[in-house]
Amino acid sequence: MHGHKIIDIQKGSIAEELDLAKGDILLRINGREITDVIDYIEWMEDEYLELSIIKADGEEWIIELEKEPGEDLGLIFEYDLMDQERTCKNKCIFCFVDQLPKGMRSSLYYKDDDWRLSFLVGNYITLTNLSDFDVTRIVEKQISPLYISVHTTNPDLRKKMLNNRFAGDALKYLQRMADAGIQLHTQIVLCPSWNDGEELDQTISDLWEKRNSVQSVAVVPVGLTGHRDRLTLIQPFSPQQASQVIDQVDKWQKIFRSKGNTGFIYAADEFFVTAGRDFPPADYYDNFPQVENGVGLTVQFASEFEEALAYRRLNEKTVEKGQYKPINQTIVTGFSAAGIIQAMADKVNTAFQTRVKVIGVENRFFGPSVTVAGLVTGGDIIKSLQGMQLGRRILIPETMLRKGQDVFLDDMSLAELEERLGIPVVAVPVRGDAFLHALLMD
C-alpha cells in the first residue's frame, strides 16, 4: 500500500476537527493515489474531497468534507515533498558543495536536484534528474515557473562540465518544456576558458530562440573557495575578464531590447564588483526576475534605501540637530558589499547625526576569494572584530544566517556571537527600507 505517513496535525486545522492523528496514513484523495506534494497541492484547490485514511489499527476511514478552495487540511507529512528528495547525479567542475571545508554539518553537503523544489522554492535544477514521466507531469499540470541551470547548450561541453554522460541529452527536456510554454528562468554559471566567449554567445542565442518559454537568463561567475583540493583547475575572473562579460551581456541586451520589451539576459552583481564598474540603472534588470540569484540585488537594495531615505526626509521636513540620538553602531558585511554599504551609512550619518561604521569581513573560512556577505561565518566576524570599539550594537544581513535559524554556516549561533563580542547583534532583512529603519532604531 503506497501512502503518506502523517507525523503531526496543525492546531485548529480541518484535520484536527476530523480526529486525524499522528501515525495515520493518507492513502488516496478522491479515489486517486498521491504521487507527491504537487498532486496534494492540486487537490487542495478543490472544495469537496474524499479522503482515504488508514488508521494505526489498520482500519480504513473514508472521510468526505467540504472546504474553501485553497484551504489546507493541516496535515504534516513524514517527507515535505511527500516523497524522497532527489539528490544531484552530477559532479560539476564548479560545484560549490564540493569546495566546502570538512567538518561542517552534514546538511550542508547535501546536493538537491529536484524539480519540485524548483517550483516550490526556486532551486535551480540541471534536468539530469528528470524522467519522461516527470516532464509529462510538468507539461500536463503546467507547472511554472521552473529554474534551470543550463550553463551551456553545447551537449558535449555540458557533459564535460557536469561530469555526466547524460547531461547533453537532458537538454531535450528544456525543449519539451519550451514547446509546452512552461515558464523558465535560467542561469549560466560562467567558468573562464570553459563556457565563456563564443560558447556563451551560442548559449544565449539558443535560449533566445526559446523566449516564448525562457523568461530570463542570469550569467553568474563561478564561485571558488580555498578548498579545491584535487578538483578541476578553474581560474577566477580577472577584472578585465569580468568587464568583458559585462560588455558581452550588454551587447546582447541591446539586440533583445530592439526586438522586444525585455533585456532577457543579465550579468550578476559580482561581475560589476570584480570589474570595478558602476552598477547599471534599475531598468537594466527590468522587473528583477533573478534578484534571488544575486542579479540586481545591489541595485534593488540601493533603490529601496534611497526611496526610504527620501520619504523620511520629506515627511520630517528637516532633521533638527538632536532630533535623533547619535547611535554608535557597526555594520558587518562581506568585502564585496562594504563600499556600497559604507556610502549608504555616510548618508545616514550626515542626515541624522548618527555614528555608523562599516567593516568588511575577510572570509577565512572559505578563503579570501569568497567576498559575499551570505558566506561570512560567525568565527570570521569574531576574528575581524575582537578588540575593536563597536558601539551599542552590530548589524548583520540576515543572509549570513541559515534560513529560519539563528545559526551561521560554521554552526556558531547568534547568541554565542553576542556573548563572545559582548554586545547585541541584530540580523537585518536584505531590503533597503529595513536597513534604514535598523540604522535609526534606538
Image (cartoon, grey):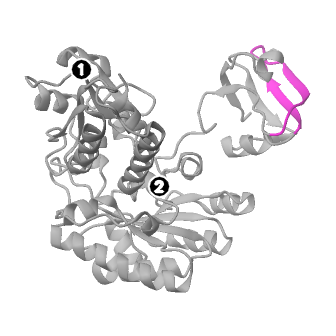
Q: Which residue is mark 1?
A: 392
Q: Measure the alpha-carbon separation of dots 2 and 1.
A: 40 Å
Whole-percent x and y of residue 109?
A: 34, 40
Q: Is residue 144 left or right of residue 105?
A: right
Whole-percent x and y of residue 58?
A: 79, 18
Location of residue 23 with respect to 160 vertically, above or below: above
Q: In the rendered structure, does residue 56 fall within the stretch colored magenta?
A: yes
Q: Which residue is mark 2?
A: 124
The residues colored magenta run 47-69
Whole-percent x and y of residue 427?
A: 36, 29
Tell me what residue is drawn at x 22 percent, y 33 percent: 356
Q: Is residue 183 left or right of residue 125?
A: right
Closer to us: 280 or 171: 280
Closer to us: 70 or 343: 343
Q: Is residue 303 left or right of residue 241?
A: right
Mark 2, mark 1: which one is toward the viewer? 1
Tell me what residue is drawn at x 37 percent, y 82 percent: 251
Q: In the rendered structure, does residue 8 fall within the stretch colored magenta?
A: no
Task: Using a 10 Å C-alpha cutoff, classify the residue at mark 1 as few (fewer than 14 neighbours), some (14 to 19) or many (20 or more).
Answer: some
Task: Using a 10 Å C-alpha cutoff, classify the residue at mark 2 as few (fewer than 14 neighbours), some (14 to 19) or many (20 or more).
Answer: many
